[in-house]
Image (cartoon, grey):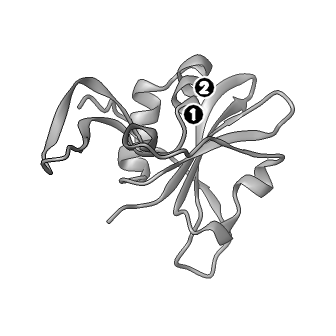
Amino acid sequence: MGTRGRIGLQLSDDSILSVYHHYDSYPSWLGRALESHYNTKEKVAELIDGGDMSCAWTDDSFRNSNGKIEKKSEYGPQYYSERGEDCPPRLDPTLASYANKERGEEYHYVYRKVAGEYTWVCIDMNSFEDKDPETVSIPSGYLQC
């Protein structure tokens, strides 16, 4: 079971290029992982370029033909393309279309300029409540694992 999310990068024309993220998209984990390990526009672009993913920060591979999960040599994203799926990034023309509650994702993240500097913004989609999406804070603290 996962907490569905979306990771996006706001481009110069205000469109947002994004990918789906399946596992533990809560701000206390994914938000901290993004702030800790994907904290430049280049790193975010590289993360998104890989397409939809199970997890943004892990050393697990997908199960092999024997059903075993092997460890990768280093931490990083676990892309669906690693198991043969084609799930490229999606482009939304505006932040409003990106933060579409109807898609069923629980948290949306967007790396965007705020007061002239790039930063991560987390949007709680309030998927299970009769409330509009709202910006929430990402807990502080480096996520080491």
Question: Residue pushed farthest bottom?
Answer: 130
Helix, strand or loop under label 1: helix
Question: Residue pushed farthest right?
Answer: 13
Contact between labelled residues 2 and 1, with CB atoms less than 8 Å apart: yes
Quadrant placement of the N terminus = bottom left
Front residue of 110 and 85: 85
* Residue that numbered label 2 is attached to: 45
Answer left or right for 104 relative to 100: left
Q: Amino acid at mark 2?
A: Ala
Quadrant placement of the C terminus = top left
Q: Position of residue 47 (x, y in %)?
A: 51, 29
Q: Residue at x 15, y 51 (%)?
A: 67
Q: Please tell me whether residue 57 is drawn above or below residue 129 in the rendered image.
A: above
Q: Please tell me whether residue 120 is drawn above or below residue 96 in the rendered image.
A: above
Q: Which mark is residue 48?
A: 1
Q: Please tell me whether residue 6 is drawn above or below residue 133 in the rendered image.
A: above
Q: Residue at x 83, y 37 (%)?
A: 14
Q: Count of labels shown?
A: 2
Q: Please tell me whether residue 128 is drawn above or below residue 114 in the rendered image.
A: below
Q: Residue at x 71, y 63 (%)?
A: 100
